[in-house]
Amino acid sequence: MRVIAEVARGSAWSHPGTTTFDVADEPVTLPVGVVLSRRRETVGSIVHVVSGELGAVGAGAGIERAFLVESTVQLDGPSTNGPIMFVFFARRRDLTTDEFRAHWRDQHAPLARRHHVGMSRYVQHVVEQGTDENVDGIAELHFASTTDFTERFYASDDSVGVIAADVARFSGRRADTYLVTRRGYR
């Protein structure tokens, strides 16, 4: 298990075994349906802590929210210097946790691989424990280039509807979406 946390802007938070993703400030053309979270005004980075306890990470100065997650790589492309999108979201409340997880893993992941053609890596992080009970999953989508993100987010105009309809089947209305870059990969 790993911990994924949001770190406040201006915080010097660090932890052994951490990969840091800086929230991007520069504007890019966003694909249809992608809306960035207003939380990005206070969140400066997203961190992966390879091993750690939620309590130790979550109690750290500068941590906004922290989640103990079980991660599944759904598309295993190479590391790139392109944009990365993190989406922190809740399940639909009329679904059980198991129904949500099964749909996201077994139904949505194949659709995402087929319709997000510019995506080079896709990781689903299922939240096991967290400091915000309104987050059940964290999606991590990597793109090799800004062009792949802005122009190849969807395979076609039909892909927009297919993805939106499926997301509505398992995800609640609230989501916090961040566009980030891996620290050191500018």
Image (cartoon, rainbow, N blue to C red):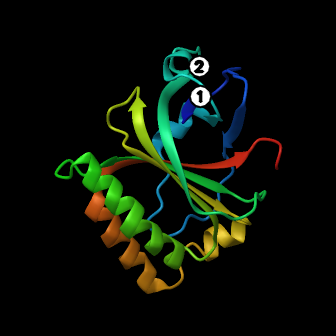
Residue in view at x 57 percent, y 72 percent: 153
x, y percentage for residue 94? 16, 51
Amino acid type of the residue that numbered disc 2 sits on in the rendered structure: Gly
Please indicate whether residue 52 sits to the left or right of residue 99 in the image: right
Q: Tell me: residue 159, above or below residue 120.
A: below
Residue for badge 2: 62
Residue at 62% across, 70% down: 150
| SS type, badge 1 | strand
Amino acid at circle 1: Val
Task: Residue under label 1, please give it.
Answer: 7
Q: Is 89 in front, or is 50? A: 50
The location of residue 44, given as percent across then percent down, is 63, 33
Disc on the earlier residue, 1 or 2: 1
Q: Which mark is residue 31?
A: none
Position in image of residue 58 (x %, y %): 51, 20
> To which quarter of the image does residue 176 belong?
top left
Q: Secondary structure at mark 2?
A: loop
Q: Nearer the viewer, residue 37 or 118?
A: 118
Q: Dividing the picture into quarters, in which one does residue 48 lie?
A: top right
Q: Are marks 1 and 2 in contact (CB under 8 Å)?
A: yes
Count of marks, rendered view:
2
